[in-house]
Image: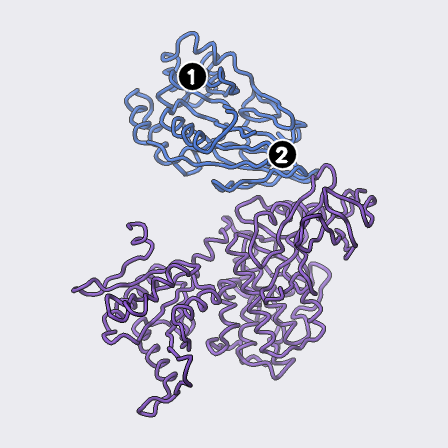
């Protein structure tokens, strides 16, 4: 089964549409949404509706910290994220907010754990920014494979039994075999707000039969998405960083 | 132990174990057969779970990851792999014959023999590097030759594919490699540079030439580190008949600073195939091992840390391409096209300062009569052509290091150019088209045949009718049509 994994869509309609079209073209059997459907971007209502529809059709969706902030507190966030969440609330109706509230922190299927942030404390939103954190996460789950998002920077960490974890920067379109002899943690990059210096949207395809993960980078209309952010009156830096990919 | 179950006649995933052909420290090798499969095959079964050496399993994982992604004549073909949870194994093509280790016993070998073997190994290495893989354990025991000639590189247990995770990244504090052949940067734990393989090949060339290992066979880390600051005795100090060019090539491979080695395995192959084109430096003249302290280099200070950003293998290769100019002096009105080809070459070189230019011209010979080597005015035709080629290249103002000149004699110019491209790791070929001459009508176009069949980028320079000559990219025009 091929799973298309999308994380950190952040209400970026142009980016998510481009990624869905690309995944459609490449072929997949199932969709996994790894959280942060909203926040930062200018199309939260559209994003929630599309994701809810995908879930009705068999996709699974997880809760991200920005999704949670919509119905909980935004106080822990930085000022730009806070401002975006306050604006996002005004764009979502009750049903949409309740749908976000219904999302789980994690999903376990066989040897795979799907989670937005990490496996050691999914609800605390700690970041897997390097191999130390990746190792911490891998040691707290018996799932051999973890897929997460949250950092907006694509990365693959691997760990042999009784050895430290090692990092790897994935190369787009080069399938990485997840050998069964070790543990793997893959940070799926961000659809709607990449932060690895590349503006193109990021998602990944995982084939459960061959155990291969392939990252994709998809060009999208960055100008349109950035323009909408400015028109919505959101912080201009949120528009700028789409151009920079950082 | 899974291995305990293995006896002759056992079936594993449809393969029948016929004979145990090798039992090493980390794995055993079985000759296997399978109904309907004609290829000779080997099954490699690692010894797992003993706990003595974790690198046994890692090496096996690496081969499991890399071998299915490789192809071509220089690698044993991948056939099948067993499930890790059941019985891990790899089935690969069995290459008949012995490894290069068998020939090392006969060393010192004749220089021509060393060059021929070395060129084939370097060609295999160039191919491997183009496929994004660094071997990191090149040694005679890991090299075989197919009956038709090409070298085959075995054992990818320490290898690295630069687009896949490095499974040895966190594996060991000890240098990873075979002590006798390991490159200095590998001793320091750097696993990012394809030129490490060039160093190892330098050790092999040294061994074949002199019958000795350049740095002995050290056992500990201190012994391995010695190559960071001490040069080996020059080959000519051991075998005085070793030609200057061969010593130059070997010592250049063995430079501590990777930047001072051949930039690519392709360039090394080229040097070994064309000894007359090897530029001799002070290395060729060395007659005894240099002093100890003089070789603690500035390099040491700068390179004792891991590089912050690993350069990808492909990028390194791109930075030192082999550019070839096929120069045709035979056209009646040749000057405009010759100038145009040179202009095109010049602009390509400007964008690639590390490129090496190989200039080739074909001297057409006849099948039916014995060709004269002296023209009407008594001059040697071959030499005359070489002089013309040198003159053509002069305005490019390239140092001897960056330029080589070749006059080929052939019946079929297109085939001769293609042969040269194939055997010399050429990355980009520039040649002139014949224009709309009667000759092209009757003889067919050399450039179109070459452009269609060359295994590299080809730029065909064609003068625009009625105006000055202009470059036209073959790929561009192909797309347009």
- Number of the front mark, 1 or 2: 1
Question: Above or below — where is A101 with respect to B376?
Answer: above
Query: In this orientation, which residue lies closer to the viewer: B287 or B354?
Result: B354
For residue A183, say whether it is visible.
Answer: yes
Specify how the rendered protein is coloured: by chain
Disc 2 secondary structure class = helix
Q: Colour of chain A?
A: blue
Q: Mark 1: few, some, or many residues within 10 Å (few <14, many ≥20)?
A: many
- Please report, as a chain letter, where disc 1 is located: A
For residue B176, say whether it is visible.
Answer: no
Quarter of the rendering containing residue A177: top right
Q: Position of residue B35 (x, y in %)?
A: 71, 48
Sequence-first disc among 1 and 2: 1
Left or right position of A192 against A214? left
Disc 1 secondary structure class = helix
Question: Above or below — where is A34 with respect to B134?
Answer: above
Q: Colour of chain B?
A: purple
Outermost top residue: A94
Mark 1 sits on what residue?
A: A48
Quarter of the rendering containing residue B11: top right
Query: In this orientation, which residue lies closer to the viewer: B101 or A8?
Result: B101
Determine contact: label 1, label 2, CB under 8 Å. Answer: no
Q: Position of residue B374 (x, y in %)?
A: 37, 89
Mark 2 sits on what residue?
A: A135
């Amino acid at each position: 089964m091929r799973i298309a994994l999308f994380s950190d869509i952040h209400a970026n309609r142009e980016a998510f549409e481009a990624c869905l079209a690309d995944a459609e073209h490449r072929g997949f059997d199932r969709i996994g949404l790894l959280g942060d459907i909203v926040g930062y971007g200018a199309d939260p209502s559209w994003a929630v509706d599309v994701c809810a529809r995908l879930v009705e059709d068999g996709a699974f969706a997880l809760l991200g910290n920005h999704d949670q902030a919509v119905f909980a507190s935004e106080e822990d966030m930085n000022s730009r994220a806070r401002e975006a969440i306050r604006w996002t609330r005004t764009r979502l109706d009750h049903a949409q907010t309740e749908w976000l509230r219904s999302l789980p922190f994690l999903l376990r299927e066989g040897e795979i754990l799907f989670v937005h942030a990490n496996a050691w404390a999914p609800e605390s939103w700690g970041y897997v920014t390097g191999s130390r954190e990746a190792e911490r996460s891998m040691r707290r789950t018996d799932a051999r494979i973890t897929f997460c998002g949250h950092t907006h920077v694509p990365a693959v960490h691997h760990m042999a039994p009784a050895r430290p974890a090692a990092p790897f920067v994935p190369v787009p379109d080069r399938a990485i075999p997840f050998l069964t002899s070790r543990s793997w943690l893959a940070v799926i990059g961000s659809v709607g707000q990449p932060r690895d210096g590349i503006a193109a949207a990021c998602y990944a395809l995982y084939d459960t039969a061959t155990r291969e993960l392939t990252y994709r980078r998809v060009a999208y209309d960055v100008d349109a998405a950035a323009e909408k952010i400015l028109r919505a009156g959101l912080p201009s830096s949120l528009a700028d960083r789409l151009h920079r990919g950082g | 132990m899974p291995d305990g179950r293995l006896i002759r006649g056992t079936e594993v995933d449809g393969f029948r174990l016929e004979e145990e052909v090798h039992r090493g420290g980390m794995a055993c090798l079985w000759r296997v057969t399978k109904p309907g499969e004609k290829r000779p095959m080997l099954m490699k079964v690692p010894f797992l779970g003993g706990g003595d050496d974790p690198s046994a399993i890692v090496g096996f994982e690496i081969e499991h990851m890399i071998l299915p992604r490789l192809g071509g004549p220089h690698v044993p073909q991948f056939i099948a792999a067993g499930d890790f949870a059941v019985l891990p194994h790899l089935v690969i093509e069995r290459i008949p014959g012995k490894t290069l280790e068998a020939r090392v016993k006969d060393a010192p070998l004749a220089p021509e023999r060393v060059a021929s073997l070395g060129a084939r190994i370097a060609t295999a290495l160039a191919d491997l590097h183009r496929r994004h893989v660094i071997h990191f354990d090149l040694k005679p025991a890991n090299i075989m030759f197919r009956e038709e000639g090409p070298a085959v590189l075995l054992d990818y247990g320490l290898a690295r594919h630069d687009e896949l995770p490095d499974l040895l990244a966190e594996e060991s504090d000890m240098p990873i490699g075979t002590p006798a052949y390991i490159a200095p940067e590998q001793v320091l734990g750097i696993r990012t540079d394809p030129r490490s393989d060039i160093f190892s090949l330098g050790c092999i060339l040294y061994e074949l030439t002199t019958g000795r290992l350049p740095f002995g066979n050290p056992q500990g880390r201190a012994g391995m580190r010695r190559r960071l600051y001490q040069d080996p005795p020059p080959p000519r100090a051991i075998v005085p008949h070793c030609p200057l060019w061969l010593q130059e090539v070997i010592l250049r491979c063995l430079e501590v600073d990777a930047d001072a080695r051949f930039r690519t395995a392709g360039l090394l192959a080229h040097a070994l195939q064309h000894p007359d084109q090897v530029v001799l430096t002070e290395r060729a003249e060395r007659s005894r091992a240099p002093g100890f302290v003089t070789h603690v280099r500035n390099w040491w200070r700068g390179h004792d840390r891991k590089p912050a950003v690993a350069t990808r293998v492909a990028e390194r290769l791109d930075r030192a391409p082999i550019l070839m100019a096929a120069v045709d002096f035979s056209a009646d009105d040749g000057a405009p096209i010759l100038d145009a080809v040179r202009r095109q070459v010049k602009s390509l070189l400007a964008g690639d300062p590390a490129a090496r230019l190989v200039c080739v011209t074909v001297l057409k010979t006849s099948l039916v009569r014995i060709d004269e080597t002296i023209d009407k005015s008594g001059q040697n035709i071959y030499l005359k052509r070489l002089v013309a080629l040198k003159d053509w290249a002069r305005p490019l103002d390239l140092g001897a290091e960056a330029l080589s000149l070749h006059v080929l004699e052939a019946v079929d110019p297109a085939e001769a150019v293609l042969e040269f491209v194939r055997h010399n790791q050429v990355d980009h070929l520039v040649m002139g088209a014949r224009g709309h001459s009667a000759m092209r009508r009757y003889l067919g176009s050399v450039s179109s045949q070459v452009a269609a069949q060359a295994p590299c980028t080809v730029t065909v320079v064609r003068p625009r009718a009625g105006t000055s000559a202009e470059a036209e990219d073959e790929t561009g025009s192909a797309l347009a049509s």
